[in-house]
Amino acid sequence: MTLAIYPVYLSDLESGEPWTAVRRVLLWALASSIAVVAATVLLGEGTVGPLILKGEEYRDEMLDWIRTGRGPEGDPSLFLVPKLIEIAVFTVLSLASAGFLGLFLGSYLLNYMNFYVGCLFLRAEDWAVPALFGWPIYAIIRVVGYTCLGTFLSIPLLRRLGRTELSQGEAAGLLKVALVCIALDFLLKATVANAIYQPILRGAIGV
């Protein structure tokens, strides 16, 4: 999936249009999310799960959280360090590859999240609940933040290679949006995951 979006993403950055690149990546993320969720629902988790890296592991972790309210999803003491490491890895990969490996990591993260959401659809009697709450608002904000951060971090290598005249100063708005989104992700994940999402999802899938 990364190979499908990267040439267009690169073209936008070469043309000096970083916000267009962000919009395209977000549309790609939406389309790939719909595809993985639909495949899981139509083909079954037993078929799709083995094809998704970390898919079954993440599904089991999240279903356990829905059942018990315990786990990294809503506990800052468990999610903060792994998330900071994830951001650090994403930063290094994006800088080193003009965004390509950052998009690759993003695709990996999206895929196992979307597989889990597809599994919620398979378990819920009312599909409106996973449709509205399967992807929590903080996770959506995180995708926006990572997209803006990765786009901002793509610029230095492209400038060094003479592929764009964009400067990071010109694209500073991307970094501001990224930092706000990442901070909101942490804050909301720590406050509303257990207070709102877990009880709603628990009621929906009957565990």
Image (cartoon, grey):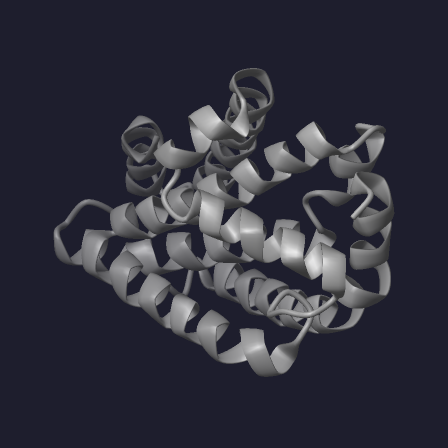
Residue 176 at x, y percent in the picture? 55, 67
| Residue displayed at 71% across by 51% down | 136
Left or right? Give the position of 63 relative to 79.
Answer: right
Q: What is the quadrant of the N terminus in the image?
A: top left
Q: Nearer the viewer, residue 118 or 89?
A: 118
Residue 182 at x, y percent in the picture? 58, 66
Residue 138 at x, y percent in the picture? 68, 57
Q: Is residue 122 above or below residue 151?
A: above
| Residue displayed at 68% across by 60% down | 65
Q: Is residue 201 above or below residue 25?
A: below
Residue at the left extreme, as displayed: 161
| Residue displayed at 40% across by 42% down | 107
Does residue 20 appear in this view? yes
Left or right? Give the position of 171 relative to 186.
Answer: left
Residue at the front extreme, as displayed: 207
Quadrant in which residue 120 is drawn: top right
Q: Is residue 207 above or below residue 15?
A: below
Q: Is residue 181 above or below residue 190?
A: above
Q: Nearer the viewer, residue 14 or 68?
A: 68
| Residue displayed at 50% across by 36% down | 29
Residue at the top extreme, as displayed: 42
